[in-house]
Amino acid sequence: QDYYTDDSQYRDSPYSGYRDDNSYYSNNNYYPSKDYDNNNEKYVCENGPFEGFLVRSIEFCRADITVPTDFPTIQAAINASNPGDTIKVLPGIYTEQITISKNLTIIGSGAKSTTINAPAVLTNGLLGSPYIVEVNNGAKLSIKGFTISGLEVQNCGNTPLDGVAGFNVLEGGTLKLDSSTIRDCTFVAVRIGTPPPLGSQVGHATITKTDITDYRNGGIVTFTSGSTLTITKSNIIGSDTYVEGQIGILVEFGAKGIITHNKVSGNICNLSLPDCGPDFFTEIQGFGIIVTCTDKGSVISNNYVLNNDVGIAVGGETGSCKFDHNK
């Protein structure tokens, strides 16, 4: 937070904070250039970054952008924003495809009232496949309080090259997803990085209190050394109606996963499909969690894994992952 008084300017100071009623507070190392006056009105810049001194105080703050008040679509607001801005989205259904290549915070009005709905026609992203939201160019996106709704169709893609992703996190991008829902037809709900055949993209994601369902292939898939996934207090729920071999959470090709306090269920290969069956070597099953343990920082603990063909599957180097207190 940046504190200052109106009609005053700041100069560099060896002290920490500003003077207020003869007390110092830990903030920026700036204080009014004239003696403190109790009659001055104090302002707090809650969202904008501190942009330097010798600037009139009222210029320090940048107001939040509101959709649809300021811009009719979320993407229009993103295009007009500056790195570090906050975009607030009022209740409604926003049918659009979104690309983020700068650091932003996007806050919906709650998953029950604010929906980003996939348009009927989606363009391809960096991987040459369609997506609803893509984070790239090293951007850091913090997004909270949305439903991301996929296509309302049976077939939303059969391979990584034609399947729809709810979120793509690529080119070193970072996704922080909180208190949201991803539903309806996606091939993969969240893709973080890519496996080597697709170019070894790196991505990072922290997912909290989020419900993910209706994916056709994977709920959350994380690929490539250097990519990271932290997921906690979330529900990953498969849908066995149309597909073979769903995976709730997948971490492989050297990626690191911290998977704790989640519920993973419903990843069952539909026995009406010809390749489904119980033989691990010749038939296909559904998996709750698959982790290839190559990073000693990976942790899978305190998860409730139920109603999957295979609950937790582990490969890789012995002792490279920590597993405990899973039910």
Image (spheres, rainbow, N blue to C red):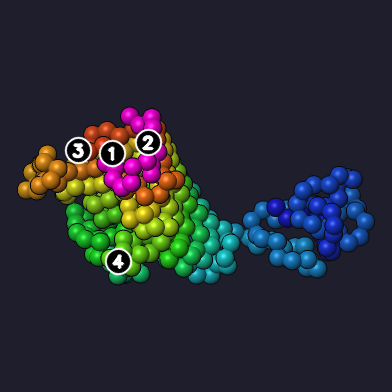
Residue beneath label 3, please?
309
Q: Is residue 218 visible?
A: yes
Query: Along the polypeptide, which appears first: circle 3 or circle 2?
Result: 3
Q: Which residue is mark 2?
A: 323
Write down the residue under mark 4.
Answer: 198
At a point 50% along the width and 54% down the height, the residue shown is 142
Asked which secondary structure carries label 3, the reply is: loop
Q: Spatial distance from mark 2 to mark 4, Cα to Cα?
A: 30 Å
Amino acid type, callout 1: Ile
Other residues around mark 4 within 10 Å, as few (<14) / some (14–19) / many (≥20):
few
Indicate which label's residue lies in the foreground, 3 or 1: 1
- Apparent side of residue 143 relative to residue 322 in the rendered image (left or right): right
Residue nearer the viewer, 3 or 230: 230
Where residue 272 appears, x then y in whole percent? 8, 43
Percent position (x, y) of residue 45? 70, 56
Q: CA distance from mark 3 to mark 4?
A: 28 Å
Q: Is residue 53 left or right of residue 296?
A: right
Q: Residue furthest right?
A: 35
What secondary structure is found at the residue carrying circle 1?
Answer: strand
- SS of the residue under disc 4: helix
From the top left corner, tell me how far across and down residue 288 is, in percent.
27, 41
Q: Are marks 2 and 4 in contact (CB under 8 Å)?
A: no
Earlier in the chain: of badge 1 and badge 4, it is: 4
Q: What are the residue bounds of the magenta stretch?
A: 313-327
Q: Disc 1 to disc 4, how far (Cα)? A: 26 Å
Magenta stretch encompasses residue 324: yes
C-alpha span from label 3 to label 2: 19 Å
Amino acid type, label 2:
Phe
**Circle 3 Cα neighbour tier, 10 Å, few/some/many (<14 / 14–19 / ≥20):** many
